[in-house]
Amino acid sequence: MSTNSSRSAKDRALYPLVSVDVALCSLVDGKLKVLLVRRDNEPQRGRWALPGGVLDPGRDADLERTARRVLREKTDVGDVPYLEQVRVFSGRERDPRGWSLSVLFCALLPLDQVPAHAGRKVAEVAWRDAGQPGGGLAFDHARHVAAALALLRDTVGGRALPLHLLRDAFTLTELQRAVEAILGTTVEKSAFRRRLRDDPSLEPIEGAFHGGAQRPAQLYRAAPGFSFEKPLRS
Amino acid sequence: MSTNSSRSAKDRALYPLVSVDVALCSLVDGKLKVLLVRRDNEPQRGRWALPGGVLDPGRDADLERTARRVLREKTDVGDVPYLEQVRVFSGRERDPRGWSLSVLFCALLPLDQVPAHAGRKVAEVAWRDAGQPGGGLAFDHARHVAAALALLRDTVGGRALPLHLLRDAFTLTELQRAVEAILGTTVEKSAFRRRLRDDPSLEPIEGAFHGGAQRPAQLYRAAPGFSFEKPLRS
DNA sequence: TCAATAGTGTCTCTTAGACAATATTGA
DNA sequence: TCAATATTGTCTAAGAGACACTATTGA
């Protein structure tokens, strides 16, 4: 057990409980989904929650390291190229253990890089719709999911977020679908491709790709500096 | 002294130091400035820093209340209509007292609502340019200021941020200057007014206003739901 | 009259949006 | 051939940017 387990309710009067939760999102069947885990410990045991854990100052150099450790322990996810802070939820009421502070992170990964099984400390995992994660979530995690989605939608353009949901090589249609999954709206095909046409940081790859019994689509690779020129808001 | 004063360096191994810093911005001579206070306590005594303070779980219902309390104590600022979370800075190295976590807030106020004198716990205050706060700031507060400014620039449109820098009644030129002060760029007058022309939530007030020896300008009032339609990015 | 700022008009150019047309594959 | 998707082209309308023009005040 970690040193954190020895924290008592009395400590809460002096020190807040500092934890990190991670909203890990992927494309599942073309839809933006968030990974939930079933809580194995009290409080709220048995309820679905974002993977999270308590800060351990002895092990974590900063809160981003805490987030990576939590993902590793709870979901066996190793490397996470995109990991961003969303915001802090705090207060006396949100956790029955007392005054608490949760720093929410958002991570994006292609689905095939997320192990299907649960991690060391978790029995069960599930993908829920990011826009409609459903009821019965532990703590204030429904608000957490909403905040993460709002951040994604606000910044989908400037930081080329959809790339983190795709493989290294992708078609323009796949890129468009990823954008649509984040925004929750549809995008006009012609206009979408038009603005990408003259972008030098989006390079076509030699060799075609086919999605079945149709015309094959050109595969592209994103150069390091790629991002959408315009906001791409919903 | 508060209970927090009893925290020892040894506690840092188990519990992080949780503090809140506030970047309070105003228009000073048409430029966006941030309020700094001279630190009166160790560590970094005598250096300029953002007004900040340690979370007191016994008094603060959540971190936003902490931010309001800090502003009140350090700068005698009472009501703050616009107060928003920016992000968290964390880690073992950023504060000599050990593992620490600082939640940064950003506040906007018209200059005439910020008392010129220092607060109860501060001897000296100063306005620094938000884009160029200068060197020698305490801790990692130069990064804090940069993060707050970046947030303001990203969200200047959607939430009508400039209104919080102006009085209730303002001219279109004043509104434009406030936008420019946040963005750090100039805005084309004709296009700026064009997009505001048909906005029903921006109401002209009966009675003119004059800025000296020129044609008087129409005063406007913003209805509750006002915000810029488009992003207004720099 | 002039200086200074408020406010409007006009032109061009870019781009989004809608939608049609063509291209290329497997079955 | 057909179904399905990729890719391009065309038209239109809205908006941004540049810039000139008019309006109204005090001095």
Image (cartoon, coloured by chain):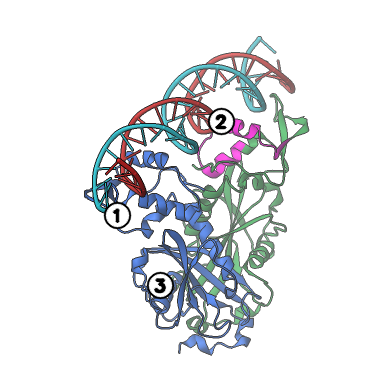
Chain colours: A green, B blue, C red, D cyan
Task: Using residue A85 as the reference point, say whether residue A13 is left or right of it.
Answer: left
Q: What residue sits right under mark 3 in the picture? A: B68
* Residue A146 appears in view: no
Q: Is mark 2 on a helix, strand or loop?
A: helix
Chain containing mark 1:
B
Q: How far apart are marks 3 and 1 (CA)?
A: 37 Å
Q: How far across and down, in percent of the image, does residue B69 sit?
A: 40, 76
Q: Do labels 1 and 2 share a chain?
A: no
Residue B99 or residue D19, whichever sits in front: D19
Q: How crowded is mark 2: few (under 14 residues within 10 Å), some or many (20 or more)?
A: few
Tag 1 near tag 2, CB within 8 Å: no
Q: In which quarter of the image is the N terminus of chain B?
A: bottom left
Q: Magenta residues?
A: A176-203
Identity, as a three-letter code, of the amino acid under mark 2: Ala
Chain containing mark 2:
A
Q: What residue sits right under mark 2 in the picture? A: A191
Chain containing mark 3:
B
Tag 3 near tag 1, CB within 8 Å: no
